[in-house]
Image (spheres, rainbow, N blue to C red):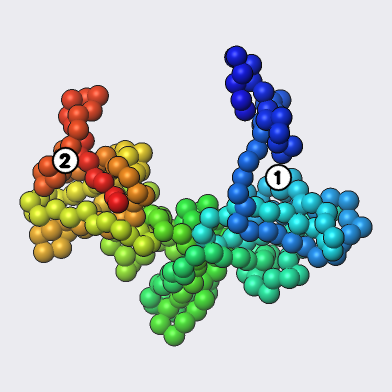
Amino acid sequence: KYITDGQWITDPNNNLIENDGQGNINSVVFFPDFQFHLPAYRDARKVYVTGTFNNWNRRDLRMQKVNGGWSLPVYLRDGTYSYKFIVDDQWITDPSNPFTRTDASGNTNSVIGFGETFVFRLQGFTNASHVQIAGNFNNWDNNELIMEKTAGGWQLPYQLSPGNYEYKFIVDGEWMNDPMNPFTIGTGNFINSCLAFKANHIFSFDGLSDASEVKITGSFNNWSKDGYKMVKKDGKWTFPIYLSKGKHLYKLIVDGKWIIDPANPLWEDNEYGTGNSILWIN
């Protein structure tokens, strides 16, 4: 909105508006990078598209009637998405998309993906009947992603955007961390495997060989006290991570004690007078 001499107004030159759910109307501007299109069904009264990109909200994204069918431009960041069309309350897969995935409940959804593919692999467990994977990349939906059985275990190709992801495998209903991935986040019964896809920085520390546990936390994970748990190998603690361009503040949590990075001369003071280490990603 514009604020003109204290009065809030929508953009008079923009016909694109929406209700914010509080009774207010706001102007909208967006830059779509993908267009959903459903051919035919010209006699339908209402058509919506819904999927993992909007938490399967069935009345959020109403499609527009165009020549030859229905269309809706949207913005989707790199990743993998399951979706369906809702034509006058009837749920259908995309007839123009041959790629589908059947979830653990037997529902078949259309699937689209953008970005590079990472292959999740679980070695062994060849006697298991069902193996799924869930993580923050699919809102921890334990019903959606069924892994494919291979000669030596299970796998699932999945397109992701660069970032840090938490996940677990579900083997015949039992949740477990990735036995081949030493990097985790969390404590107690809430520990998840951590994947830094397209990692562009590695936190590494030499002088803490006597510590029993070292975590890294900062502005990149909302200063979580659980932090990312670093792994010690040959006396060195490491953790790979993907960080956006710009400035990041961080600290180490060494056996429960918060300290600045002793190997990094860049730091700034904070509101507690204890300082934060600084990392710049170009």
Looking at numbered disc 2 in the image, what kind of residue is underneath it?
Answer: Leu
- Distance, label 1 to label 2, CA atoms, is 46 Å
Question: Residue 91, relative to residue 24: is it above or below?
Answer: below
Give the number of the disc on residue 60.
Answer: 1
Badge 1 marks a residue whose secondary structure is loop
Q: Locate residue 149, reporting x and y percent.
A: 50, 79
Please name the residue shown 44% across and 72% down the image: 119
What residue is pinned by disc 2? 266
Residue at the image point whose x is 38% and y is 61% from the top: 197
| Sequence order check, earlier mark of 1 and 2 | 1
Q: Is residue 187 visible?
A: no
Whole-percent x and y of residue 95? 76, 70
Q: Are marks 1 and 2 in contact (CB under 8 Å)?
A: no
Labels in figure, total: 2
Residue beneath the point at 81% across and 65% down: 39
Q: Residue furthest front?
A: 13
Please identify, in this view, whether the residue under mark 1 or under mark 2 is nearer the observer.
2
- Quick one: label 2, few (<14), some, or many (20+) residues within 10 Å? some
Query: SS class of the residue under badge 2?
Result: loop
Query: Which quadrant holds residue 168?
Result: bottom left
Looking at the image, which is closer to me, 277 or 59? 277
Farthest residue, direction right: 43
The kind of residue tagged 1 is Asp
